Amino acid sequence: MNTPARDDDDLRCAEHALGVLGAQERAALEADVSRDPALQRTLDDWQQRLAPLAEDVRAIAPPERVWTRIRRDLGFMTPQRAPEPKRWRDSLSVWRWLTIGASVAALVLLGVTFGLLRQAPQAPPTAAVPSEYLVATIARKDGLVHWIATVDVRRARMVVVPASRVKVPANRATELWLIPPNAKPIALGVFPADQPATMTLPPEIVAQMNAQAVLAVSDEPPGGSPTGAPTGAVLATGQMHST
């Protein structure tokens, strides 16, 4: 269900804005941009489009014990006892790198999502949703993100990218559902839990996708729910929002 990304100028600009280009590719694009005003506008458009997505990446606050250790090490506190052996979770640098890693991972996933969407065939547009893209972070109740779903409204295509490892029994499947406001769940299809997947959406489904709708993933038999409604446990949910 995957298609390799094409190396065209628009995709290069998207990857540059996401920060996933290598040093040589980044330098080559910047050299091209300095000579091509149209390419510069394309890069500016991608930077403006993707900048709001970084606001959804939550910072990881270090535990209070980390700040206590810092104050003690700087001499602001009188040590009461011999220091305990240093553990990895007490390291400020570990928490700082975890925060940076989470941000980069989210941006890379979004880059993969946009790359897959750009290669989908043209489909009839819908006028029901004004935004060009809709995004949903599908997470468990404890906040762990399992999947990121991105909808290309103009092409009526959706890409679902795994954000963490999800264990699903061999005799079970993951099924995606759209839950419009004050409406029953609508089955969108079964998809592999551990790899990116693309789905073609009928116009009537796209028309019900908006910032008030919710995506949910349930545990179902192979082939999906036999009743047209979720029958297994709901693994994760996420509200849609425009980009």
Image: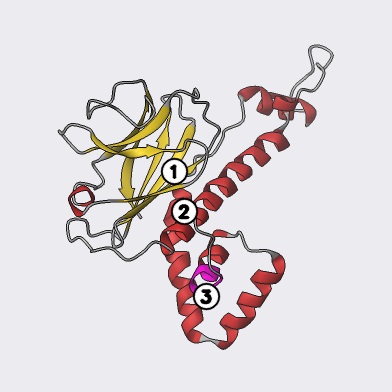
- Name the amino acid type tagged 3: Asp
Q: How far apart are marks 2 and 3 (CA)?
A: 17 Å
**The C terminus, quarter of image:** bottom left
Residue at mark 3: 9
Residue at mark 1: 148
Task: Identify the secondary structure beneath mark 3.
Answer: helix
- Judging depth in this view, the residue of 95 and 115 nearest the camera is 115
* Residue drawn at x 33%, y 33% as measured from the top left: 216
Q: Residue furthest right?
A: 82
Q: Residue furthest bottom?
A: 35
Crowd around label 3: few <14 · some 14–19 · many ≥20 (10 Å): some
What residue span does the magenta drawing correspond to?
A: 7-13
Residue 157, by quadrant, is bottom left
**In the visual, does 95 lie left or right of 47?**
right
Question: Vertical placement of 20 versus 176: above or below?
Answer: below
- Name the amino acid type tagged 2: Thr
| Residue 156 point in image, percent of width and height | 29, 57
Q: Is the magenta region chiefly helix, strand or loop?
A: helix
Q: How far apart are marks 2 and 1 (CA)?
A: 8 Å
Crowd around label 2: few <14 · some 14–19 · many ≥20 (10 Å): many
Count of numbered marks = 3
Question: Vertical placement of 163 versus 40: above or below?
Answer: above
Query: Is there CB contact under 8 Å for labels 2 and 1?
Result: yes
Indicate yes or no whether the magenta region holds residue 228. Answer: no
**In the visual, does 196 lie left or right of 187?**
right
Q: How far apart are marks 1 and 3 (CA)?
A: 25 Å
- Judging depth in this view, the residue of 177 and 16 nearest the camera is 177
- Judging depth in this view, the residue of 220 and 100 nearest the camera is 220
* Residue drawn at x 46%, y 50% as measured from the top left: 1
Residue at mark 2: 113
